[in-house]
Amino acid sequence: MEQISVFDIFKIGIGPSSSHTLGPWKAAMMFWEELGLGGRRSELKTLKVILHGSLAKTGKGHGSDLAVVAGIMGEDPVSVDPEMVKCILTAISLGESFYPLGAGGFPFRPSDDIIFDRESSLPFHPNAITFSFRLGDEPEKQEVYYSIGGGFVVKEGQSGNDSGKGQKPLPNAIDKAADLLYWCRLKNLPVWGVVLENELNWRSREKVIDGLLDIWEAMKDSVAKGCSTGGKLPGGLGVKRRACPMAANLLGYTFDPRSEWMTQVARQSDSFDRVLRWVTCFAMAVNEENATFGRVVTAPTNGAAGVIPSVLLYLQCFSNSNADKDICRFLLTAGEIGSIFKKGATISAAMGGCQAEIGVSSAMAAGALAEAMGGTPEHVLMAAEIAMEHHLGLTCDPVAGLVQIPCIERNSMGAIKAISAAYTALESNPDSAKVSLDEVVLTMKETAMDMSSRYKETSDGGLAVNVPVNIPNC
């Protein structure tokens, strides 16, 4: 049984894609760290990095080459200065070489040494990255890593995720929603209570709470940055940022990220139209930041990073909920729902289309909101099921391979659906539900398997081919 922590689902990192940016970044770090542990970096004579399949087809728009460089330069996506990221991007565009620390002066030139293999896809997963290298006088070697969605990385020949938690038995083993419900009923605990018991298997209660609040602070920071930054998004599409003018229009004055902006938002009218506009604004703010290689939190992916923060802000600003405990309970619940989808289906758009990103994030947010609003475990699972049911078959077709069109707007749609799903569940009798969460997870998996690869983050179909663009090498 794969063990997935809430902190595996929620990762602080750099946009625009958890599978195409964060994944290759972590793969490069893993490769580089292995060389370091073996004390062999200084023997490196040649290094070629090959991006296969979906990684190659949309790698430029997702900054996969940036990720590889940052990883072998020793930059950490959690703490790296976003301005450093922009400097790396500029250097790559100018064709400059990089000199990885500890490589004995070995030059790495992305324009020559990173290869975008758009023609082949490796069997295990469409997001494959091969490191082809030579040490000293030895023959050339190859190591293959797979970015399997949500920032999770697996090395060829290994199994499980890269969290390094080991396989100590959990007090509440959960593979499916039915398992989660079993433990809730047996122990008379809410969903978050069952999840917390598992988290305490890996870290102290204090570290769990502090970690969750750190995640929330990072989410809020991405909202505030997005609501206060105007201009156009990078990449050549000329997409204008809309969250900043939207926030200013709603407030009646310029949004100031240094102020008590949540209090100012909460003081406003909670009329339906204003709440709807704020939720939309919050979601778009996060994903506009994501599109600019800014810092966001995978939830469960970068492309869907705006749904959870916007729904949690809805809870905080418009539902009289401001306590830290509500934030922690929300994130614990959402994280477990995300792990159920990862175990039973996928959270990778390259495997399942956008139903695996926005659909999963909407289900996570719906279940967590139902929990926060006083719902039973049955209500929580019902809310998650409703949200996913109405995202089934959603394709991933980013225009020009950029996480902008239709990705940014889809986050606001996923957030609104999550809120609607939560209230629908809370007004229903779960005993009368005709569809279970496990059934919808299975359906999503089967839908993903049937879906054409053209609609799985390859930009070979849908809006990606029907919207005219003129960007070189898009």
Image (cartoon, rainbow, N blue to C red):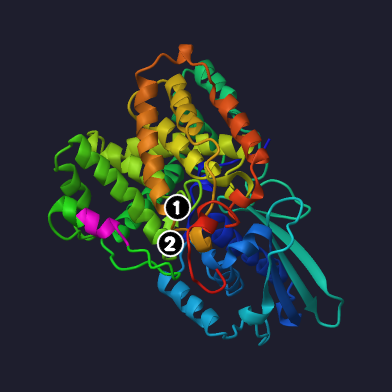
Q: Quadrant of the C terminus?
A: bottom right
Q: What secondary structure do most residues of the magenta stretch adopt? A: helix
Q: Is residue 242 left or right of residue 124?
A: left
Asked if marks 2 and 1 touch (Cβ < 8 Å), the reply is yes
Quick one: 254 or 410, which is closer to the camera? 410
* Circle 2 or circle 1, nearest the eye: 1
Question: Which mark, by number, is residue 291?
Answer: 2
Secondary structure of the residue carrying tag 1 is helix
Q: Position of residue 48 (x, y in %)?
A: 72, 75
- Label 2 – label 1 distance at C-alpha: 9 Å
Q: Quadrant of the N terminus?
A: top right
Q: Position of residue 28 (x, y in %)?
A: 64, 66
Identity of the residue drawn at 40% across and 47% down = 411
Q: Which residue is mark 1?
A: 407
**Residue 267 appears in the picture as rendered:** yes
Which callout, 2 or 1, points at the residue further toward the start of the chain? 2
Residue 178 is one of the magenta-drawn residues: no
Residues shaded magenta? 241-247
Identity of the residue drawn at 54% across and 49% down = 396
Q: Quadrant of residue 49?
A: bottom right
Q: Is residue 179 left or right of residue 299?
A: right
Identity of the residue drawn at 29% across and 37% down = 315
| Disc 2 residue type (three-letter) | Ala
Quick one: 110 or 459, which is closer to the camera? 459
